[in-house]
Amino acid sequence: MKNKKKLKVALIITFSLCLVAFLGVYTYIQIQIKPLLRQDFELNVENISTKIYDNSYNLVEDYTDNFITIDELNDDTIKAFISIEDKEFFNHKGINLKRIVGATLSNIKNKKIVQGASTITQQLVKNKYLTNEKSIKRKIREAYISKQIEKKYSKDEILESYLNTIYFGNGAYGIKNASMKFFNKHPKDLTLNESAVLAGCINSPLNYSPINNIINSKERRNLILKEMFEDGYIENEEYLENTNKDIELNITDTPKNNLYIDYALEEASNILKLDKNEIIQRGYQIYTYQNIDEQKILDKKINDDNYYQKNKYGNIADSLGIIINNDNYSVSAISGRSEYNLVNFKRQPGSLIKPIFTYAPAFECGMIAPCTEILDEKISIKGYQPNNVGNRYYDYISVRDILAKSLNIPTVKITEKLGVENCKNFAQNCGIEFDENDCGLSLSLGGMTTGVNLKNITDSYSIFTSSGKYIKSAFIKEIKDINNITIYSRNMTETKVCSSDTSYLMTNCLVHAVNNGTSKKLSKLPFQVAGKTGTVSLPNSNDNSDAYSLAYTTKNTIAVWLGNYSMDDEFFLSSSNNGGTFCTEIIRDTLSEIYSKNIPQNFEIPDTIIKCKIDTKCLQEDHEIKLANNTPERYTCEEIFSVNFPPTELSNKFNNCEPFDFNLSIENNVAQISFIPKDYINYEIYKNNKLLKTISNENYEFKYFDNDIRNNVKYDYYIKGINKFSSIEYTTDIKSICNKIDYNNYLKYNDDYSFIFS
């Protein structure tokens, strides 16, 4: 009886827990789908007439031309996609529970995701309405929208929309673009072989595109042909015949750059407060700033395998490059290479943020000048212990060289002195957005919670090309509606962030970084260019996750990112793939081609910059900036400063003789004198008021050995310093030595020879 009672209690508890769990899951699902309940999910892409133009008013995208109906596709193409992507497409209602269970068990067995369970409808929903975010929330919303789509549209309409929107790689969106891109033919004319190749691309465009990797593409094609044979869509003879065929590409010479269009549509969506799909369907005329010549050059470089280093797994980096016209702060070109969505994704910026977050605000308040020297050493600030790359430290080093070498320690020191909040405020005025958790000194090194996107960080550098004004770049200059009425015209807005002198001081340092620092691969370009690199390394590893290079001339700003979008282990960059290598090479060769016939002018020095002659000895020895004052020419240099923060203190290096000291010791009846001389002072070493040695033009530790020493005799030494240029003298205190010998002790321990002293 007791056992039955216990069993009953156990069943009640189990039921209660299951009920609570069910209610919890149900409630969570309801919360996630609540924002979607009133939305109407449209697939209607017929009668599309929105057109997009470049900066010369040439038509670059006509959505009417891109769309094809399901009737324009041949059966082989449809069956290829069904076989590999969703065998039960015509039977399920948006989601395939059997496939989900099978995929889950397979993934558990392999302890990683080896099999997906998304239906074609779910893939369509993700591409049209959601992001690539890997989360339960997204999967719930994906399933809900898929069910709604299935209720509203036929299978043919869903498949039609799917094939018109899916990405095939190499800038080709939609089956028509891909067919024209790879084979230069209309989709209805695709062969079985070609249909299988295209169906194989979409699983991983970067790996299975026949342009990127013909071997992988062939293997994937053969897998699809096998699936089609097993599904009964093709005969054994067709299967064997096509698996032995080569892939014969016929690549079109002028592929459309859909990434620029994607960004333009994103901007149009923000401007018009409409969904991108709605914009596409409403017949707008969108006029962009795209420079087709620069776009072709950037496309060519971004897609050139010579700029991509394979890591230990044989994988290459994802990439993104952007070119901004500094005359009107417009995006003239943008290009990327990835199987992921490259629109507005965010990453940690690494050292690329240093000029914006730390150095510009420090210049602006007069804390530093390019020649200011800062001690580079190991530090610990309230438990925070940053390191330089390679744990290399340079003692005192100028701001100009700190930026060139992209050193971390001096950057953190300056940031601490400025205050993190002050630095954040400055960066926010430059368009940089921070997470609420971004509050530590690591921000100065790019350690952000969410990060920034490449366009934002590139836009922030506009303060250095526009005399201190922040100007957000744009893709679109004008939008007209279907009635040809202008409904948007760009009005370029400016925000004054810093002075023109701060802008130029930073540019001067970044030109130095090109000639002597991490951006040195740009140094042989036959025009003036400023540059900064950034690298995000992985903790406790030699690998990198992100590499950046940014450069600007008086005409353009260009930035390139190479990185691991997915953050999966097998796609990290090797240590040699950093901001100063392949990223910078892409920028170098892009700029070289863009300016092959029209070299940009040098950066103009504003009236707010002054040149002062400073004493280099004060800088090197005392790490102070002082004006030359009776300083010999060889000990001076001309440095630049803000007119608001010039050096005011005069150097006295050559008007007196600074106090100094020396070390004196004796060993084995030899006296040793050592000190560090200055090359502008003559030194005289005296022993018992007798001159022993004169020293001139020495600048390193000097040692003098005096062998003329007798036991039990006291010797007095001192050194006189005489400034070569002012004849002012300084004499050190006298130091004495005596090599004492106790002969009684000597006799005590040397009895055999005592008769000599008896």
Image (cartoon, helix red, strand yellow):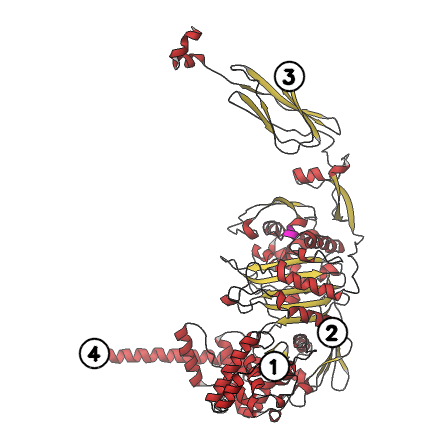
Q: Distance between the residues labelled 4 and 1?
A: 75 Å
Q: How far apart are marks 3 and 1 (CA)?
A: 96 Å
Residue where numbered disc 2 is placed: 292
Are dots 4 and 1 in contact, CB under 8 Å?
no
Q: Earlier in the sequence, mark 1 or mark 2?
A: 1
Q: How far apart are marks 4 and 2 (CA)?
A: 82 Å
User: Residue 302 or 276: which is nearer the viewer?
Assistant: 302
Q: How crowded is mark 3: few (under 14 residues within 10 Å), some or many (20 or more)?
A: few
Residue where numbered disc 1 is placed: 248
Find residue 188 and report its horizontal and vertical position in percent.
62, 90
Find residue 717 and report its horizontal and vertical position in percent.
60, 20
The stretch drawn in magenta includes residue 403: yes
Q: In this view, does 607 lie above or below 56?
A: above
Q: Which residue is drawn at 78% across and 62% down?
A: 599
Can residue 158 be seen?
Answer: no
Residue 682, by quadrant, is top right
Residue segment shown in magenta: 402-409
Residue where numbered disc 3 is placed: 689
Are dots 3 and 2 in contact, CB under 8 Å?
no
Q: Which of marks 3 and 2 is in front?
A: 2
Please name the amino acid that badge 3 sits on: Asn
Q: Earlier in the sequence, mark 3 or mark 1?
A: 1
Residue where numbered disc 4 is placed: 3
Q: Which of marks 3 and 2 is nearer the N terminus?
A: 2
Q: Residue furthest left?
A: 1
The residue tagged with tag 1: helix, strand or loop? loop
Are dots 4 and 3 in contact, CB under 8 Å?
no
Q: Residues within 10 Å of mark 1 (few under 14, many from 20)?
A: few
Q: In this view, does 31 lie to the left or right of 59?
A: left
The residue tagged with tag 3: helix, strand or loop? loop
